Image: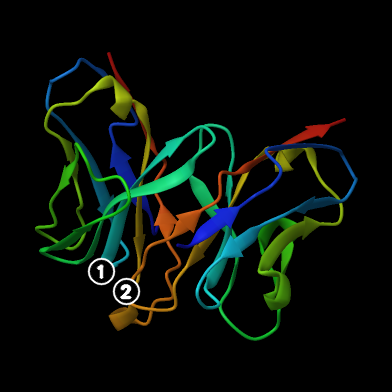
Amino acid sequence: AQSVTQPDIHITVSEGASLELRCNYSYGATPYLFWYVQSPGQGLQLLLKYFSGDTLVQGIKGFEAEFKRSQSSFNLRKPSVHWSDAAEYFCAVGPRSNDYKLSFGAGTTVTVRA
Amino acid sequence: EAQVTQNPRYLITVTGKKLTVTCSQNMNHEYMSWYRQDPGLGLRQIYYSMNVEVTDKGDVPEGYKVSRKEKRNFPLILESPSPNQTSLYFCASSLSPGQGGYNEQFFGPGTRLTVL
């Protein structure tokens, strides 16, 4: 069965420091990969996605993610965090088929300290 | 503006009182889905629809119903709500494979439901 693991429930980072959020998945074949961000009281906004091609993908708000097939990972990074990046981040995977079911990780809450 | 809308945004109700949460999208998406979000569990899919009059169960369908009579709307119905359905609910939509989509789902703002 497919699963998505975000090992870090909560991360605290200083403003201006770098951030890396981990995501590992268990899937039969390479899925579509997504990172979503949920700011307090808001819906989910797509940060970036991986479908094929270059394994380093760029997203909005200065985020990037790297797909590593050998490690079944899709880690999210940002070189310099801003206070507005405080939010909950979800990794999601979906099959490359007509079955459009997205499987989500449990989420990582990011706190940014001044 | 392309968007997914949900109503109501907040709802407090009592056990057994039927309720409907509406969802509408203006992007001509064939695919729509409902999720519930609970702390520590991420988002779990309740039901989804690949097109008008086509719906199917997700991971946690018990206690919920849906209908898809027109492309833009996908209401979630709780016939007899119970306290364990207290949660944050999200509707999402996407282009279907037939529309050239890649499962990139757009989410509504969420509906926070409390069942007493």
Return the residue nearer the eye: A114 or A35.
A35
Left or right, B98 with reference to B17: right
Q: What percent of the width, then of the height, locates residue A14?
A: 88, 37
Does residue A56 appear in this view? no
Q: Which mark is residue B50?
A: none
Q: Secondary structure at mark 1?
A: loop
Q: Which residue lies under the disc numbered 1?
A: B30
Mark 2 sits on what residue? B96
- Tell which of B95 and A100 is nearer to you: A100
State the SS at label 2: loop
> What colouring method underlies this structural image?
rainbow
Query: Is B79 placed above or below B115 here?
Result: below
Q: Quadrant of the N terminus of chain B?
A: bottom left
| Chain where mark 2 sits | B
Q: Residues within 10 Å of mark 1 (few under 14, many from 20)?
A: many
Q: Position of residue A34 (x, y in %)?
A: 57, 63
Task: Name the amino acid, label 2.
Answer: Ser
Q: Give percent across and percent down for residue B79.
A: 11, 32
- Above or below for B64 versus A48: above
Asked whether the residues under marks 2 and 1 belong to the same chain, the reply is yes
Q: In this view, which residue lies farthest toward the front? A: A1
Splitting the image into 4 quarters, where does residue B68 fall? bottom left
Q: In the rendered view, would you say A8 is above or below B82? A: below
> Residues under labels 2 and 1: Cα distance?
6 Å
Residue B113's quadrant in the figure?
top left
